[in-house]
Image: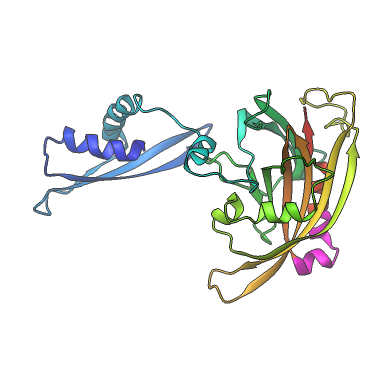
Amino acid sequence: TITMISAAIAALLLGSSSITAFSTCSTIPRAQRSVLYCSHQSIDNNQNDFLSVGRRPFINIFAASVVTAAAIPVISPTATLAAVEDTGSAATYAYRAGGLPSLRSLGLGLLQRYEGYVAAPANSRRNQVFITFDFPSDWLQLDKLGGGIQYVDQRNGDKLYVLRAPLPEGKTLSTVPKAFFAEAIFDPRGDIVRSGTVVEGGRTSKSTVLKDCSPAGEEDGASSSPPLPADCMERRRLLVKYDTVTGSGVQTVERRGLVDAYEVDGDAYMLMTSSNAVKFDAKGRERDTVEAIAESFRVTL
């Protein structure tokens, strides 16, 4: 939105109503902060007078656009989505809330622990929900700006997602049919499919109901997580099988997903790992990694 406004204001500042303006921006990390670099091009109706504006001149244009943009209400991704359509029980990203998460190294530094808050259900008395999980330190974060929680192993394409989905009316985490989870995760209205992943034949093959009675972080004796309630929390572990279609659209790849889920005020909060089916079924290092990630997932109320 700011880029579009900047382009419009740039045309006004250049003093011509016949100018068409284009701006392209990118964020480049510099030490402990990110710097916005933009290139701006203006073309008049005679297809001449090209003008490039570098970082410093663009700051003045950008500042003017911020003043104008201040009058426009800021709408969160989840609020925008709710205003456009009802996603039903489809699984969407559990968006980050309450500031940036904590990432701290474990052991020799091969693993790191994610600790942070995600948005609570809309009808909940809570504002946010605390989650934690462990994963390899060299996995790459995706969707940094969008607010979702996704990481990928760049060597083999294994991924992890943190998702949430409303449970059907009258059902709980333990009573909802196991088919619900694959249907919610791979629903066309859900964020995994809408992000561009083409899925075929998703189904839940295994389901186990567990009890979680240990606070997050007990392994190393220290955690920034708030205390758990006295009662144990119910969790559910599932295995989903599905195929993804390659970019060419002519080849499918079998994949396996491990899902670990908790219930919070009528919503299922899930961590899902995604792996190549051949490597997963071979029970090697790749499977050990995703099983450890799923096992480490905790939701704290």
User: Which sits in the foreground, 63 or 267?
Assistant: 267
Residue at 31% x, 40% y: name it: 4
Q: Is residue 105 visible?
A: no
View extreme (left): residue: 46
How many marks on residues?
A: 0
Viewport quadrant of the N terminus: top left
User: Which sits in the foreground, 176 or 249?
Assistant: 176
Q: Is residue 169 visible?
A: yes
Residue 202 drawn at (x, y percent): 70, 62
Residue 15's place in the image compared with 276, above or below, is above
Q: Quadrant of residue 200?
A: bottom right
Direction from residue 36 to residue 68 in the image, left or right:
left
Residue at 63% x, 55% y: name it: 187
- Residue 202 part of the magenta segment: no
Residue 155 drawn at (x, y percent): 67, 60
Residue 285 drawn at (x, y percent): 82, 59
Residue stretch in magenta: 277-288
Viewport quadrant of the C terminus: top right
